[in-house]
Amino acid sequence: MMRVGDRVVAFENRCLHQASPLAGARISRGKLTCPLHFWRYEVATGRHLGGAGLLPSFRVEVMDGDVYVEVPDPTPELSIREMMLRHAKEWSRE
């Protein structure tokens, strides 16, 4: 979660590059830099500076000086069986 001017933005703690955590990222001149592989993003929008896409963001509301972030319920992990069935349905012999 970061302040951008008079707004607050919140992004998922996951870089678009190899899903590295963004915790500990450096922020300078409106740019956020991933601490592991140095991918850079615009803080105001979450846009990757190299064109790889947008960081997943969360809805933020500020009320009476308190910041509320709407975080969705986590997606349940698939079992090994479910992953294999999904892969088998998508796999093509061509």
Image (spheres, grey):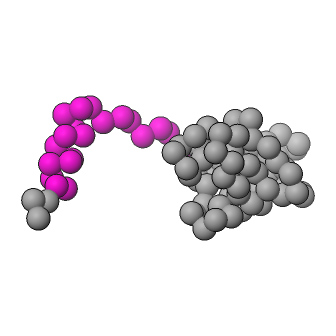
Q: 74 or 48: nearer the eye?
A: 48
- For residue 48, side relative to residue 86 (left or right): right
Q: Which residue is drawn at 80% across and 51% down?
A: 8
Q: Whole-percent x and y of residue 76?
A: 38, 36
Residue at far bottom of view: 51
Q: Is residue 58 visible?
A: no
Toward the viewer: 62 or 52? 52
Residue 83 covered by magenta stretch: yes
The quadrant holding residue 47 is bottom right
**How far across and down, in percent of the image, does residue 52 sit?**
57, 63
Residue 83 drawn at (x, y percent): 24, 40
Identity of the residue drawn at 74% across and 60% down: 42
Image quarter where the C terminus lies is bottom left
Relative to 53, residue 36 above or below? above
Judging depth in this view, the residue of 8 and 86 nearest the camera is: 86
Is residue 31 shown left or right of residue 81? right
Please name the residue shown 16% across and 43% down the image: 85
Tell me which residue sits at (74%, 35%) in the image.
24
Q: Toward which corner of the image does residue 23 lie, by quadrant?
A: top right
- Tell me which segment is drawn in magenta: 72-91
| Quadrant in the picture for residue 12 | top right
85 in magenta: yes
* Most foreground residue, 83 or 76: 83
Q: Can residue 56 be seen in this view?
A: yes
